Image (spheres, rainbow, N blue to C red):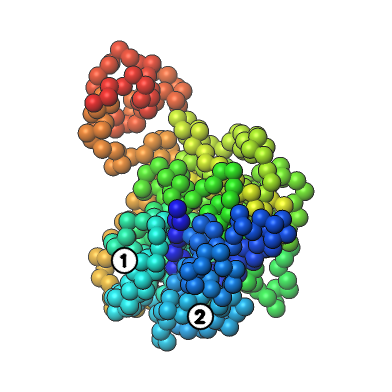
Amino acid sequence: MVREIIFLHVGQCGNQLGHEFWSVAIKEHLNNKKINEKKDVLGKYCYMNDSESSFFENVCGDLNSSHNENLKARAILIDTETGVTNEVFKSSIAGYFDKNNIFTQQSGAGNNWSQGYMHYGRIYENIIDNIIRKNVEKCDSLQSFYITSSLGGGTGSGLGSYVLEMLSDNYKQIKFSNCVFPSACDDVITSPYNSFFALTKIHEFSNCVLPVSNDALLNILNSKKLKEKEHNNKNDYSKMNNIVANLIVNLTSSMRFEGSLNVDINEICTNLVPYPFFNFMLSSLSPCLETENIRNFDNLFKNVLNHNNQMLIASPKDGLCLSMAFLCRGNISISDITKNILLIKNNLNILKYNKDATKIGLCNVPPLNQPYSLLCLINSCEIRNSFLQILERFNKLFKRKAHLHHYLEYLTMDDILEFKEKIQNLIFEYSYIQKNSFCSSKFLNKDTIEMLGYDICDESYITVNNGSDDTNTCPNYLKQKIKINDKNTNWFDFKNKPII
């Protein structure tokens, strides 16, 4: 059955990322089609098979049609300016986009989150909702929404937050957010406010978030020696967009092509998000660029945790890993993948009681100009350092009330303080599970805990068997109620527990 994905590209950065992604994805599909034609297997792997129908709509209705002009990307372009969308429709892939799936305005959001969210969101809610609804009605079995945006500007952060909240209210499908964190030296002065407000909304209404940062992308370009003369090309956004596009291409490869172990977005959210609160992923890619040289397959795993391959300024080795996924592409054996994953696990701090929380994906079709590639996704507590940086940048302006009057036109001071409390809670929860290896009691259902024979309490700490081993400890908020004599059973061990 076809499992469609609808892409929503919001704001200047979101539309540029979307254009780059579709450019690479279309090249891959055309290249795969040529290979299949040479192998005389076009009948088996027709150009519009179920996998590719997840991303493209065939407007002529003929599933075996090979005419590219009959294919339309399942993409919606949203912006409050027309500059980027005009460039998209002048590009070589303009024919793949439906003009009915575009919403633009002339004025822009003025780099103001509150204006994009409170003003444009409410005014144009019905128009955007109608565009989304028409695309949903064309789907046989909608799987998820994929949103690309930036947190630094006004449209991507503000209007993007409103669209995400609207999707959460109207549709039960998975919402997967791919957001760009602004750099510390961002050219938008109000980006600390915008990223601060948008982060709370993305965290609240997304099922899974895949953040990337401009600082990390620049580090990748520097490490690959691709950055040219600094005075002529200080920020090469086209190459940075291509890195993020390759990330999305590898993430969705199992949904677009056949493979031994296909993984869709629903599986990623199910396996990598243990609690709804912990829905941010650290991502790393090897190779990051099409021109990068890879000696052999084992080097993919050696490089993937290198800081020069990280999409965010954070090291998974320094934080507690809640879960992870390795999505591979190319002619690779499962045994080689599992061997290298075991080596990587030895260098990571993984939950003692959840060391097997690893998802493996394998797509048989290699990326463009490379024999194989690897995308690593890790749900790590180290992400909290990025949140701390956003909070610190916000506090520097907020303490002095600089530029705050632009936001107080739409927000009250109580609203801003509520946003701040949410970010502080987010940082606290990641720090809590990093320190104690348990989530806080807010995520546990009291009835379920009682069924397992425990009470939620306020005791400082309970150590089973009075041992020092971390595997023999239970959370400070759980107190054993039954089976007191069974002290050899860990709190997380469901064996021999009563089933009610």
Is residue 327 among what the camera can see? yes
Q: Which label's residue is closer to the chain start, 1 or 2?
A: 2
Query: Real-space Cα distance between discs 1 and 2?
Result: 23 Å
Rendered position, 34 above or below 117: above
Question: What residue sits 77% from the left and 48% below the top?
Answer: 295
Q: Position of residue 93 (x, y in %)?
A: 59, 75
Residue on which the image places disc 1:
166
Q: Nearer the viewer, residue 418 or 25?
A: 25
Q: Residue furthest bottom?
A: 106
Label 2: how many Cα within 10 Å (few below 14, some 14–19, many 20+): many
- Assign a secondary structure to mark 2: helix
Q: In the rendering, at what x and y percent does residue 498 appear?
A: 27, 22
Q: Is residue 316 visible?
A: no
Q: Which mark is residue 35?
A: none
- Residue for badge 2: 85
- Percent across and percent down for residue 43 are 61, 57
Q: Pick the quarter of the image with the C terminus.
A: top left
Mark 1 residue type: Met
Residue depicted at 46% across the width and 74% down the height: 77
